Image: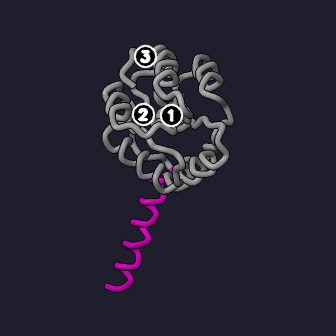
Amino acid sequence: MKIQSRHQVEHDHRRPILAFTTDPMAAVAMNEAAELEGFQDANPIEASIDQAVEMLAEMPTPIVLIADLGADVLAGVEKLAAVCDGDSTVILLGTENDVTLYRTLINMGVADYLLKPITGNGLSASIKAARAQSNHPPAPAATADTSANARAHEAVLARQL
């Protein structure tokens, strides 16, 4: 979100991802997306938006923040804006299907707004696209996996030559 940072914290001290929801199906999708993106220990926290805001007020905002806003999206995003660092990638989930709302959120600096119900693959694609447009590198595990796959591929090619 495009807000002035409250925390002057080095990036390596921030959590790579943090997700909040009270919806069990959204929590499953969040877990699947985190696993697909290579984030370790990224279990979503069962919390309302008000509880999430209270928690975020006491810590540096994670690099990727996923929050389930439920039905009152604009009120929830305003609360988040008060506690989010300016360089966090924020992906919001909600139940309001409205193009004007989507455009408003994007103009506020939200990376994406996904209409529930969501899937792990859909959220993973949103995380990937948002991180590609930001200055945040991919998750360390995803990078390591890609490097390992590249080395394995090189080894196979070397044996074939």
Q: Position of residue 58 (x, y in %)?
A: 61, 17
In the drawing, what numbered circle is on residue 30?
none
Label 2 Cα neighbours within 10 Å, binned few <14 / some 14-19 / many ≥20: many
Residue in the image at 52% along x and 24% along y: 76
The amino acid type, in three-letter code, at marker 1 is: Leu
| Picture quarter with the N terminus | top left
Q: What secondary structure do most residues of the magenta stretch adopt?
A: helix
Q: Position of residue 81 (x, y in %)?
A: 46, 19
Label 1 Cα neighbours within 10 Å, binned few <14 / some 14-19 / many ≥20: many
- Between circles 3 and 1, the one closer to the viewer is 1
Q: Nearer the viewer, residue 128 or 30?
A: 30
Q: Assess whether residue 142 is covered by the magenta stretch.
A: yes
Tag 1 or tag 2, which sits nearer the N-term? 1
Residue in the image at 56% along x and 34% along y: 70
- Tags 2 and 3 touching, CB below 8 Å: no
Residue in the image at 67% along x and 46% along y: 24
The amino acid type, in three-letter code, at marker 3 is: Ser
Q: Which residue is mark 2?
A: 89
- Tags 2 and 1 touching, CB below 8 Å: yes
Q: Position of residue 14 (x, y in %)?
A: 53, 29
| Picture quarter with the C terminus | bottom left
Tag 3 or tag 2, which sits nearer the N-term? 3
